[in-house]
Image (cartoon, rainbow, N blue to C red):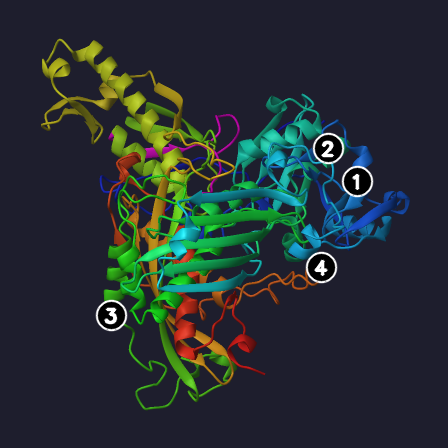
Amino acid sequence: MAPATGPTGTPTRLDQSAGTRAGVGDSPLRPDGTLKVTGDFAYSSDMWHEDMLWGCTLRSPHAHAEIRSIDTGEALRQPGVHAVLTFDDLPAATTHYGLEIRDTPVLAHGRVRHHGEPVALVAADHPETARRAAAKIRVEYEELPVVHDEASALGEGAQLLHPDRDDDHAPHVPHPNIVHRQPIVRGDAEAAAGRADVIVTGEYEVGMQDQAFLGPESGLAVPAEDGGVDLYIATQWLHSDLRQIAPVLGLPEEKVRMTLSGVGGAFGGREDLSMQIHACLLALRTGKPVKIVYNRFESFFGHVHRHPATLWYEHGATRDGKLTHMRCRIVLDGGAYASASPAVVGNASSHAAGPYVVDDVDIEALALYTNNPPCGAMRGFGAVQACFAYEAQMDKLAAALDMDPVDFRQRNAMSRGSLMPTGQPVDSPAPVAELLRRVKAMPLPMEAQWESVGGEADVRALPGGLSNTTHGEGVVRGVGYAVGIKNVCFSEGFDDYSTARVRLEVVGGEPVALVHTAMAEVGQGGITVHTQIARTELGVTQVTLHPADTQVGSAGSTSASRQTYMTGGAVKHVCELVREKVLRRGRELFGTHHPAWATAELLLEGGKVVTDGGEVLASLVDVLGEEAVEAEDEWRHRATVPFDLETGQGFGHVQYSFAAHRAVVEVDTELGLVKVVELACAQDVGKAMNPQAVEGQIHGGTTQGLGLAVMEEIVVDPAAKVRNPSFTDYLIPTILDTPTIPVDVLELADEHAPYGLRGAGEAPTLSSTPAVMAAIRAATGCALPRVPVRPEHIVEV
């Protein structure tokens, strides 16, 4: 076995020096920012080992088929091939994995359940050799009927995709092809409908969106002398991966050592495993390091996507514009395996009414097993689909009542103390009406801005852009509004915690803090925030970040807008423990020299121990001496409980975040082309820990919502095959598609959260999509019940 040495391209400690203006509330530069801009940052796909092999995956060309036979002989005879593995070569009794429900096979066995499912693995001395060998593996399939929608999943005689399922959710679902179901019932919606003066209904559809991260799945597994393996990987949750990987390898967790490598984006698509187990299996079989890097085509099959959804809604209101009731049914397509579908169902159902006060609700949300690509976590996590539907309903109600759509929303907006459909009170600021007021008050962009000073149209600013399809004929402007609500952190009784280790010592004559967590930095900026917290709590300017790995306790997933709250909270908590140790030592050393050591409130500021009145008692260098002070601990938020499986009642979420958008669009009504001119946003973040990073998160989330509105969709045909697995055919917004995004940030502290902060990354993804759609409806008069909108939806052909 090769020794467990680090490969080229593994992460190093990030040293960050800063002045006093680099604590909480400031915007210091990211320590990895310059490296990323210049191209010097080491991503997981850049890793290299002098003795490594290349791994390749053979994937199913069918969405549903029995595997009759697999012949690997010709592939094994290829020069340069070191190993070919199938299901029968797995070393342990555990052959399946999953985030909560272990229903995903490491390699297909007996049957394949989706297009692109892994069937066999190859390790070779060159990536092209591995690909050619994989192509020589002969698999005999017998195709089976495809389950591709609700009718084929739940209809009479439906194929059961997991007939032997055995998990905690199974007793609570009425059909084996339902992954999870969550009803929420409060009050009496049917009786309340009788009090409504206006009732509107709608059927809506959300397409399958991809996370479209720019860094494809990749990693390097290095076999170790102790029989274990060292895995360098781009992921969102090191310890969740570890929990799933070790049993499949037949190894104790301490022999699977994981280190986070450079992550090129995630947005939920790296919560599930992709090539982690495959690389480890090949490395342990061959005794050599094995690197796997997906190309863009394979990446579309290698990770989960946003759940496509069909949604039916009914709302009622009185003549004075007060909501009476709402009823809805949300059906999410979970694809072939469970992934995060149960939690997505919980989110979709509990946020189905939006940020509005409505006492009588009847909600049902469920996720189906189908032969479509597996779906799981993506930014917004179930709340995106619901927001698109309920905001369309708000516009319908406002129109039916001849009311301004913003005024109608404000009239029904929740505030602190309002009850969610689950019966949970919103016990922190909920400035829904204020966000709408602020976003509406922002100046509108100049009318007809696509005209130049000389009167000639600038085609770059027109719908269709540089394709030069129009010169302004038939272009109509529209304005639309939307607001959304999203939970923060893990929910429904999940044991959500994060671990931090902090060490304070004197290095080179200065006090330096070393912060070690397992947080996955996927671009959200935690590596900056953690240094800001350490500076604020320990009064130092020098902070070093240890690479994230499994040699420290879990930090949970970089998802659910939770890392600043949770791992930031853990770093704050452990820094406080370190500070107390430092002050205790100071009292022991210098307590007899000054009475303030015993009587005053003491702080660490500017590398010194000071009283709350600013009197300096000692320098940190003198207090620490040659002995470091260190602490490690777990930190948890307040407890939540699972939603009742019959009524959906329960204190299921930790915190809520809110964002509102105003979209301005110009539409060529003859060609069906859309230009989004502006997407203004107002959002409450509780406390802007790093204001520049917060604004970047809002810009990014807004742009992903724009993509879902007008262009992004994985197209799956009736045979459940993906038709557009490339960035040629799966379109994402570029700089030419992205409008100006003015941002108004509120800071209304949540007293339950560290520093009063509120998770900020997901909320803008919710309301940006329905705002764009509302603006297009205003411009065209079309109903547009589906996203993404296409030209043929706007123009009747």
Left or right: 195 as drawn, with respect to 492: left
Task: Say if mark 1 contacts mark 2, CB within 8 Å.
Answer: yes
Left or right: 393 as drawn, with respect to 290: left
Which of the numbered marks, if any, corresponds to residue 435? Answer: none
Q: Amino acid at mark 3?
A: Pro
Q: Provide the residue designation for mark 2.
A: 95
Q: Residue at x 27, y 48 (%)?
A: 415
Q: Provide the residue designation for mark 1.
A: 109
Q: Secondary structure at mark 3?
A: loop
Which of the numbered marks, if any, corresponds to residue 443? Answer: 3
- Pick the quarter of the image with the N terminus: top right
Whole-percent x, y for residue 217 in the image? 61, 47
Whole-percent x, y for residue 367 in the image? 59, 47
Query: Cα distance, mark 1 to mark 3?
Result: 59 Å
Q: Amino acid at mark 2?
A: Thr
Residue 38 visible within the image: no
Q: Judge the density around disc 3: few (<14), some (14-19), many (≥20) Cα neighbours within 10 Å.
A: few
Q: Secondary structure at mark 1?
A: loop
In this view, the residue in front, 137 or 386, is 386
Query: Cα distance, mark 2 to mark 4?
Result: 25 Å
Q: Which residues are drawn in magenta?
A: 539-560
Q: Earlier in the sequence, mark 3 or mark 4?
A: 3
